[in-house]
Image (cartoon, rainbow, N blue to C red):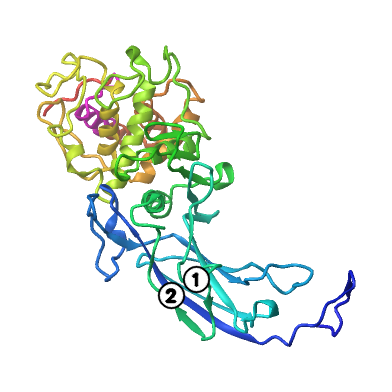
Amino acid sequence: MGLLAGLLGGILLLPSPAEASRTITVEGRLFYNDLRNIGHFDYRRTMSGAVGQQVGFSAGATNYLGAWYVVADFYEVDTVPNSILHPNCHSQTLLGSRTINYRGEYSFTATIDDDNCNADGNVYPDIAVKFRLRFCNASSRCYSVEDGNNDTYELWHFAASPSNPAEMSIGTRVLADAAFEAAPYDVNAMAANHYAGLVEATDIWHVQEGVPFYYSDFGEVFIEFPSASFTSAKTTGNSRMHFPMPAQWPAGGYHEFGHILHARAWEGTTGNCGNCPGGVYDRNGDPDWNGTEQEYDHTALLEGWASFVGVATQYYPDGCGSSWSDNTSQRICSADPTEYPQTAAYVTHPNAGKSYPRNVAKMLCAWTDEINDNDPNMAGYGDIFHATLYSTWSNMENLRDWANGAAGLHACDYVDYYLNERKSVANVGAAAHDDYVEWITNLIYNAGISCGYPAPSGT
């Protein structure tokens, strides 16, 4: 640096002393209190290094797990702000970022100059660490949790903040363990629980299963929490999930993420309901949907798909769990005795099976699971078919293009696309096509849906 920087307003800017560089390392661990009822707790480790387990919410409960995929930002900080008088001082200078691993660990190394902000009286650089509930890699996935003002949740480390920085007088500084909360059980801790579910869902679908995230088309995925826009969980558009403040604690689950997958598969929309008087959710004058109530056919696909994504993510990689394959604990709805001659006490309403979100979810679960389930009360030999989550999603993505964007698409359109396009005679040959028709017909009948196919023989 020159000996004379110049004169401004009659003030002589004196040269800074020669700067010395040093390599520093900042290490530590971050945890969060995971009290969800649903989650992949075993993806993380406890503070003692044990495999994470479910604890659930109760007064005074704690379940601190590694803050997997929370991002730590590392700053050099000066207590004196930048100005004409202090050109070498900067309140915060971002040095870099690290993604926290499943054990809650982070480590950052950089070579930086000694503190040359003479006005703050420090010789050694001061470091601050900020944690944020946002991870973004445009080539794989990008997501965050925001508050009601659309600000990303962020917290400074209590022992490395702008007001209380960590002085790097030694080469490596190990910070004390911290938790993503300003106080136990606060809104930050709840937000971290929502973030944990988003980490799991995006990891399963976009990393392990390889479903495209479509960042260039739709950008980042957001959770807004707490959302004042709705009194229950709701997804708007192709990128934003809303969760209101819970009565006690976020329960967990991935249903709303299913709507995100759906919208991004269908070019940003979940489709047009078609002939749906009153609106998508207003069949029979009821403004809310229920898995065991008759809905519009398109609504049943919309919510049935999201329910499928929810349970398939929850039980991954083991299908949808035994209860969704079992028609005793998760009864099918509306099996018509004229179409399903083997039905008995499981019938709840004499209506079309494809109009019930639960049936649609059970159909999709059977599509992917490896359980050879067979309800003896239903026609056919049950479900012996199995496909990957990626393949099942691919059917959903290609359905809309195959149907030329038609309104009112439903579960039987999904079946028809698979049998008459993807596994058509032209694509797989007559013998293979007939096999697929047999397998899928048995599968959908076992889920309480016929799609106009003749009832399969046997039980």
Label 2 environment density (alpha carbons within 10 Å; few <14, some 14–19, many ≥20): some
For marks 1 and 2, give the CA distance: 8 Å
Q: Name the amino acid type tagged 2.
A: Leu
Q: Position of residue 417 (x, y in %)?
A: 40, 29
In the rendered image, the quadrant that contains the C terminus is top left
Magenta span has 444? yes
Q: Residue at x 51, y 86 (%)?
A: 170
Q: Which residues are magenta?
A: 437-452
Q: Position of residue 133 (x, y in %)?
A: 46, 55
Horizontal side, residue 434 vs residue 206: left or right = left
**Residue wearing tag 2:** 175
Horizontal side, residue 437 vs residue 19: left or right = left
Question: For residue 414, what is the image quadrant?
Answer: top left
Callout 1–callout 2 Cβ contact below 8 Å: yes
**Residue wearing tag 1:** 160
Q: Secondary structure at mark 1?
A: loop
